[in-house]
Amino acid sequence: MRIGLGFLLVLVMLACFGCGGGPVAQAGPPSQNPTTSTSLAISQVAAGSVSNNSAVVTWTTNLPSSSQVEYGPSASYGSVTALDSGPAVNHQVILNGLNAGTGYHYRVHSADASGQAVSGDAAFATLATPAASASLCSTPLSGPIVNATPSNYKSLLNKLQPGETLSLAAGNYPGLYVSGLRGTASQCIVITGPASGSPAVIQGVVGANTVEIANSSFLALENLTIDSLGIDGAFGISAHGGLSNLTHDILIQRNTLVGQGASQQTDGISTKTPTWGWVIRRNKIIGAGTGIYLGNADGTDPLVAGVIEDNLIQNPVGYCMEIKYQLPWPSIPGMPTGPTSTVIRNNVFIKNDQPSPDGNRPNLLVDGFPSSGPGSSNLYEIYGNFFYHNPREALFQGSGRISFHDNVLVDGQYAAAVFTDHNLPLELAYVYNNTVYSTQRGIYFGSLARTGDDVIGNLVFAATPISGSIAHQSDNISDTFANATHYVAAPSLTLGSMNFYPLVGQAQGTALNVSAFTANADYNLDFNRALKGTFTFRGAYAGTGPNPGWQLQAGIKPVP
């Protein structure tokens, strides 16, 4: 019998099936859960809890694996953490001993029995060393603490000497008139309420301002609640009287001002005397007619070399804050005559929808300096502020000489930030590294700055992002209001929901030319006071991914 070749091949295959290293077929139905090979993968890499000397790096893996981080000042790294071999899918490694105000690159490593996975390069910047606050009244006092109550504070007040503290007990005090109290540059006079617990409340009285300061200097008012009780015209804290009131170097710190909302013309804090050296810090001014009003409507009574920092000014009838224009200064012994700056930084300026019967007002307005003579070369340095909501006006309006950087501006009608002539010309406008989110105009120049401008490195989402009479603008990123979602984490007009920190890979470009700004205060620090590094970021934040800093809200912005 002849056997065909095909039959022989079948016999050979049947004989050899199961021989050697091949699998042996089993009887029964096929497996419903076949084994598959899965590769180790890394995701959700982030650096958070960033301080001036540490950061926490987190990531996840799809399989339990080890944890290790490479890091350093460049993508060459240079440092590596100790290997944590404990298997995990949610990884956390703390980087300690970092330098303040420094940019770091990093990547993460994980490994298991199947192999190793390495992330791509990422970066973060440590926070800068905390800003040196204005040093007024920072020297420890050598004099005694004088304890006072509502029944005896007036008799003790005018006896205070340099280096002494009048400590007001909790209770209600009918007005505070401070006259002739002169501390020294090294030994201020301090009037304070309790730092915690029930407050010392200075209450308004009809026919007077709630706190009035006359012919005093190197004086601090701290930890007080100043309640004008809704009395029309009863300012919270006032220094008025023009040339008859020689008052300067006043520290207003950690106070709460309420009850100044009877009319738009009632101010929380007001100066109507030529004055200098005021530091207004960490105060809450809620519901005033005008939150802070510095200067006089006729251009007299200039404020010189002031610092307004870390305040919450919320829901005024008119301005959150206004600094009036300045005519040529009177000659006053001790007033600085060389170039100085008035610094407005790290404040929160918020308005609501209530009407403004005496006219719609921006959240913040600054006017020009004298056209010649002392003060003509002075500068407003406005940075690190959060401007939120204005139903009928711009969030910011400025003339004179202005450096405006690393602010966050949300909402505003008819524009977010306006630079224009107002009483006096717009002279200088450096506008850089701001983040703007508005349904209207973003950054608008109504006038050409006479001696120079530079609009650079801003991140603007608006119907008309950047417009007007601008001579020099470059390296900005602008897009429509709706397209902000492509660039930042959570663009929103709602407090508590908004987050304008850039998404990974967004809001960056070539290095900015910042040579014109190097004399500006903190020009190299972003809104979170993180170092800007090589100046490649656009907008107020120099980073991407999770925001390691303060979340925008109606509160005092903490400064690290």
Image (cartoon, rainbow, N blue to C red):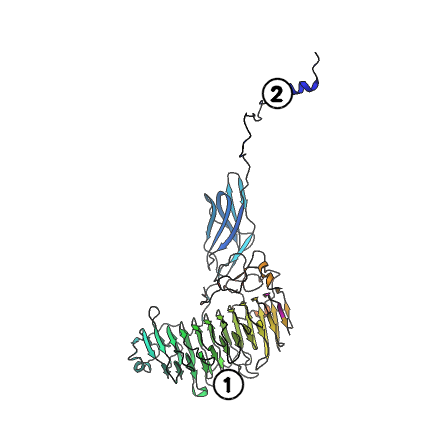
Q: Position of residue 534 (x, y in %)?
A: 57, 61
Tell me where the magenta segment starts and ends, as one range.
460-466
The kind of residue tagged 2 is: Leu
State which quadrant residue 467 falls in.
Answer: bottom right
Q: Is residue 117 left or right of residue 225?
A: right
Secondary element type, mark 2: helix
Figure disc tally: 2
Residue bearing the label numbered 2: 14
Query: Is the residue marked by circle 2 packed among few (<14), some (14-19), or many (20+) residues within 10 Å?
Result: few
Q: Position of residue 333 (x, y in %)?
A: 46, 85
Residue bearing the label numbered 1: 300
In terms of depth relative to the viewer, which is nearer, 144 or 551?
Answer: 551
Residue 407 seen by the camera: no
The kind of residue tagged 1 is: Thr
Which is in the foreground here, disc 1 or disc 2?
2
* In contact (CB < 8 Å): disc 1 and disc 2: no
Point out which mark residue 539 bears: none
Q: Main secondary structure of the magenta part?
A: strand
Query: Is the residue marked by circle 1 packed among few (<14), some (14-19), or many (20+) residues within 10 Å?
Result: many
